Amino acid sequence: MIVKELLNILEKWAPTAYAEDFDNVGLLIGGKDTKCSGVIITLDCTEDVVEEAIEKNCNVILCFHPIIFSGLKKITGSNYVERVAIKAIENKISVISLHTRLDNHPEGVNKVLCERLKIRNSQVLIAKKDNLKKLVVYTPEIHTEKILDALHKAGAGNLANYTECSFVLEGTGRFLGMEKSNPHHGKPSEKISLKEVQINVVFESHLFQDVQKAIRETHPYETVAYEIYSLMNSFSEVGMGRIGYLEREMDFSNFLKFVKIQLNSEAIRYSPPPNKKIKKVAVLGGSGSFAINDAINQGADAFITADLKYHQFYQGENNLLLVDVGHYESEQYIKNLIFDYLTKKLPSFAFVLSRTNTNPVNYF
């Protein structure tokens, strides 16, 4: 397997379109045509992880957090980012990052958190916008099923728990070819009127090229009439954070103990507790202070996240319990998710789960 093939597998699983605009994901160091001797999976790409990769004969590091986040103006080894880049390049090691591609993923960071905390019936807390498109295409009636089948194979028509969704309208198509035309019906320079159908399907934006390819390869017409629209609808299965319900309600003290145990957190910071039991819980792995109001607006009793600042703990207003479990602690299980997916996808390839503890925070 070469790096490009691994990137294609990751793209189908966690599309780049899921990433936030500010993020830096994908192949950060190395070439796409490099042959993979082994892939080591980690939360962070540190110097120790690079050493571990060398030791275990892995020339690809697949990490959650991007080691290069903003632009580098020089690479002299003056900080840990530059040293990691130099060491990786010197040892011909490629580095790939997923980050917010898995933050927004329906089965990603926050779904894992919900599973660890036994949160049931969870839904996306902040749905990702501008992620849906709609295709409208016109075709002779007899080709409807063939085109729909190709579109569905390309991923169009998948909506939450439903697949192969479409809407079809019957109508009349009219066209007049020119002398050089090669019409599927009729002859050049002949005015044609025939029964057609209008096919409507919705698809995720990252499938744009696949959907267009499906149309081009299956439509009978020399020139295909179709339209693609960007929808304002938020895609409810893709987005930041999740919110759902505990198996049973708890008072805040028992709830904090439960969270501490389930996330193996050495220390938890929390806001003044609300005068009520905890039942409805929102989660957002990593730095999630931007979602406090979303948790409040959706009626959460508690919001679990990380990196809260002093004044942000006031925002709970004694009605929402804000719980800061630590950045690493909220995302620590994601490398296992990546490892499990890839080992099932490619069981004969050498994927290695990093044993290096990359948490930079210590507790006294």
Image (spheres, rainbow, N blue to C red):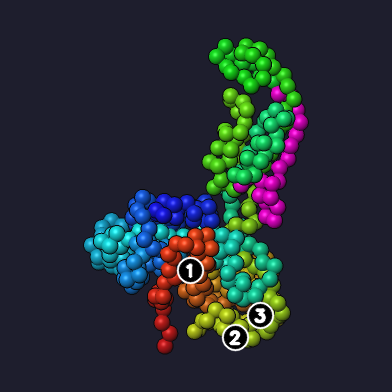
Give the quadrant of the C terminus.
Answer: bottom left
Q: Quadrant for residue 184, please give it.
A: top right
Residue placed under numbered mark 2 in the picture: 257
Q: Earlier in the sequence, mark 1 or mark 3?
A: 3
Q: Residue furthest front?
A: 348
Q: Are marks 2 and 3 in contact (CB under 8 Å)?
A: no
Question: Which residue is pictured at 47% across the width and 74% down the height?
Answer: 328
Q: Secondary structure at mark 3?
A: loop
Question: Which residue is pictured at 69% across the width and 50% down the height?
Answer: 163
Q: Secondary structure at mark 2?
A: helix
Question: Which residue is pictured at 52% across the width and 77% down the height?
Answer: 325
Residue placed under numbered mark 3 in the picture: 274
The stretch in magenta equals: 155-173
Q: Secondary structure at mark 1?
A: helix
Q: Is residue 93 above or below residue 159?
A: below
Q: Earlier in the sequence, mark 2 or mark 3?
A: 2
Majority secondary structure in the magenta region: loop
Label drawn at residue 335: 1
